[in-house]
Amino acid sequence: MSFFGVDQLNDCIKQFGDRQKAFMRSENRALLRSVLFDVPRRSSLGWYCYYERAPSLLRELMQHVSPEDIGRSMRRLCSRPYYLQLSILMCSYLGARQQILLDQGLHRGQPYADEKVDDTLLVVDFWQRACRAYRSDGLLFADQDMGGQPILPDNQVEWLETRIEPTSQQDHSRLRRLAATLELYIFMLHGEQRDGLFAHGPYTVGGGEQIVMLEFTDLQNDFLPWAATEAQNPYANLVLVRRISGVRVHFDMFGGIRWDAPDIAPHVLAEGLFTRNNENSIVPVPHEEAEHIESCAAAAQIELFLKATEWSPRYKAEYGVQLFANHFRLFFNSLPDSQAWDERIRSEFEDAAHQLLDELLAQDQPPSIWNYMATTDDDFFWPVVA
C-alpha cells in the first residue's frame, strides 16, 4: 500500500523526469545508436517488462522485506543493488508508461482510460522510500546536496581513509589504466549500459579533504546468457578509493561522476584498491595486482565483443530482456531463495517481452519515445490524471 497520494506521486514523477531530461540531454543519450546493439529497441523492450511485471513482483517482495530494509542493506561498499537499479526502476516503468500515452495519441493532462494508478503509486513509493533509507542524507537526488551522493556510514569512510596510501605517479597511472579497462569490460558485458560502475561521495575528512569512491561490480556475472568467458576476472568487485583536494565532483542519477578539472592527477593525494570478499569483509588489493586484473578484464572484454559481433538483428534488441531482468532481480538478493527468484523474474520478463518484440522489430524507426525525449520541451513523463 502506498504511503502517499496522487499529488505527491506526480511531484516525484516530475522531479525524476526533469533530472532524467537534463542527464539525457547533456549526453545526447536519446540519440544514442550502436553498431553492435539496438540500444533504443532493447531499452524500450526492457522498460515494457518493468511496466508489465514489476508492480506485481514488488508486491510479493514487500511481503518479505520493506523498501526501507532494502535501502539500508545497500549502504555498503560494492552493493548490488545500488543507486543505478533504483533509477532504472523509475526510468523503465515511467518510460514504458509514457510510450503508451504517446501511442494513444494523448496530450499532457488528458486522462488515460487504462491508467494503472495503484501500480504507479506502488513503484514510485517503493523507489522514494528505498532511496531515502539508502542515502546518508535522506534525500532523493544528487543535485539536492551540491551534487553529492553519500551512502556510507561515517565509520566505514573512516576505516577506509586509514588504509589508503599516498599516491606515487606510478601507482596513480597503474590504477587509472585499470579503472579504464574495467569500465570497458563492464560496458561491453552490459551491452553498452553502465551497470557495474558506481561513483559515490564526496565524504569530507580532515583538513577539508574529501574521499571519493569508484566501484566496479558485476565482474563475475553468471546470470546474463553471454557473460561466460574463458578469461575470468579474479575479483567479483573492486572499489578504487581516492582522497582528493582542490577539485569539485558531481554525481548523476545513474551513478556517474564528473570532475571539475581536466586532469585529476594533481588533486589525488592518496589511493587504495579494495574488494568485498565472500565473507562480506572489505580487504585491500595490492596495487601490484592491477596489471594482472587489467589483463584479465581486457581479454574477457575482447571475448564479449566477438560474441556480440555474431548476434542476429533480432537478438541485438531481444537481449534487453536479460539486461533489465539482471537489474530487477537484485532487489530480491536478500531473500533466502534468491536464485529461484532469478529464474522467476527472467521467465516473467521473457513472457512480457514476447508480446512486444515482433512489433518493435517490424518498425523501421525506433519507438517514438526516443524522438520525444530528444526534442520535447514538455515534461519527460506526464502526470497521472486520476
Image (cartoon, rainbow, N blue to C red):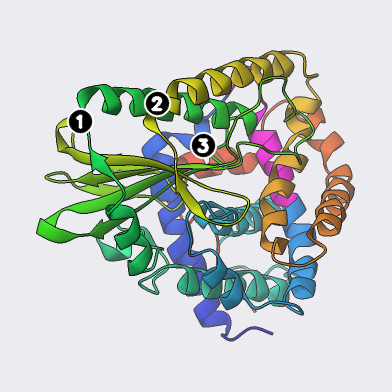
Would residue 260 be visible to someone looking at this image? no
Quarter of the picture holding the C terminus: bottom right
Q: Earlier in the sequence, mark 3 or mark 2?
A: 3
Above/below status of 339 relative to 228: below
Question: Label 1: few (<14), some or many (≥20) within 10 Å?
Answer: some
Q: In what element is the residue under mark 1?
A: helix
- Label 3 sits on a secondary structure element that is helix
Tell me if residue 142 is in the magenta stretch: no
Task: Report x, y in % for residue 13.
Answer: 52, 66
Magenta part of the chain: 34-48
Q: Position of residue 185 (x, y in %)?
A: 56, 26
The quadrant in which the N terminus is found is bottom right
Give me the disc on residue 288.
2
Q: Viewed as shown, does residue 169 lie left or right of 48?
A: left
At label 2, the amino acid type is Glu
Q: 287 above or below 258? A: above
Q: How far across and down, in percent of the image, does residue 226 sit?
A: 76, 28
Per the image, label 2 sits on a secondary structure element best described as helix
Amino acid bearing label 1: Ala
- Would you name the residue on which mark 1 appears? 265
Which mark sits nearer the N-terminus, 2 or 1?
Answer: 1
Q: CA distance from mark 2 to mark 1?
A: 19 Å
Q: Nearer the viewer, mark 2 or mark 1?
A: 2
Foreground of the two, 366 or 218: 218
The circle drawn on residue 30 is 3
At a point 51% along the width and 51% down the height, the residue shown is 78
